[in-house]
Image (cartoon, helix red, strand yellow):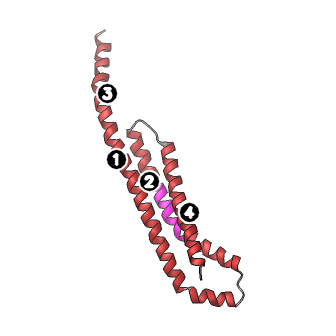
């Protein structure tokens, strides 16, 4: 009877510490998610500006290619491929990095957090896809 009583007391002592640990790691997880969103939008914005500057420099070359008979769909496909390659590396790096950080922080919260990782990665994909499409549309303008 003494051993079982001791183990119950240990659980009672551990419960407040677990609650405090959940608060600390929960706050860390919240900060990581907010910082991730800020950095992903900032990175996508910087890439958008970079691509627009490159498009402005290449405007004369694209005009010559159009005059030589390059079809519009081919020009759009080239612009989309170029934009996709520029946005792909930061997307993969950011998604893997955030996924690992969130997964390991979630392990301390007694929650594997698989759905949270998937949601954050999908948010990254949606932000980069939106900025990529915006970049292609803006570079197509004359």
Q: CA distance from mark 4 to mark 2?
A: 17 Å
List the residue tagged with mark 4. Answer: 129
Q: Is residue 48 left or right of residue 66?
A: left
Q: Is residue 40 left or right of residue 25?
A: right
CA neighbours of label 4 inside 10 A, class few (<14), some (14 to 19), many (20+): some
- To which residue does mark 1 refer? 28
In which quadrant is the C terminus drawn? bottom right
Marks 4,1: beta carbons within 8 A: no
Residue count near mark 1 (Cα–Cα under 10 Å), binned few <14, some 14–19, many ≥20: some
Task: Find the distance from the CA under tag 4 to the CA under tag 1.
Answer: 27 Å
Structural crowding at the residue carrying mark 3, measured as other residues with C-alpha within 10 Å and reported as few (<14), some (14–19) or many (≥20): few
> How many angstroms separate mark 3 from mark 4 (CA)?
44 Å
x then y, percent, for residue 1: 31, 8
Is 42 on the left-hand or right-hand side of 56? left
* Disc 3 + disc 1, Cβ < 8 Å: no
Measured in 3D between alpha carbons, the distance from the residue under mark 2 to the one under mark 1, in whole angstroms, is 13 Å
Q: Secondary structure at mark 2?
A: helix
Magenta residues span 85-98
Left or right: 33, with 9 as reference point: right
Q: Is residue 59 magenta?
A: no
| Whether label 4 touches label 2, CB < 8 Å | no
């Amino acid at each position: 009877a003494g051993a079982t009583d001791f183990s119950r007391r240990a659980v009672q002592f551990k419960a407040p510490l677990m609650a405090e640990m959940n608060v600390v790691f929960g706050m860390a997880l919240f900060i990581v998610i907010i910082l991730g969103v800020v950095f992903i939008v900032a990175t996508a914005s910087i890439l958008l500006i970079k691509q627009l500057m490159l498009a402005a420099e290449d405007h004369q070359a694209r005009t010559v290619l159009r005059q030589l008979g390059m079809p519009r769909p081919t020009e759009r496909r080239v612009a989309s491929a170029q934009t996709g390659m520029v946005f792909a590396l930061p997307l993969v790096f950011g998604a893997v990095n955030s996924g690992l950080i969130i997964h390991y922080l979630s392990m301390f919260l007694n929650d594997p957090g698989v759905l949270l990782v998937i949601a954050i990665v999908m948010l990254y994909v949606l932000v980069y896809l939106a900025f990529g499409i915006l970049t292609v549309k803006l570079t197509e303008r004359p």
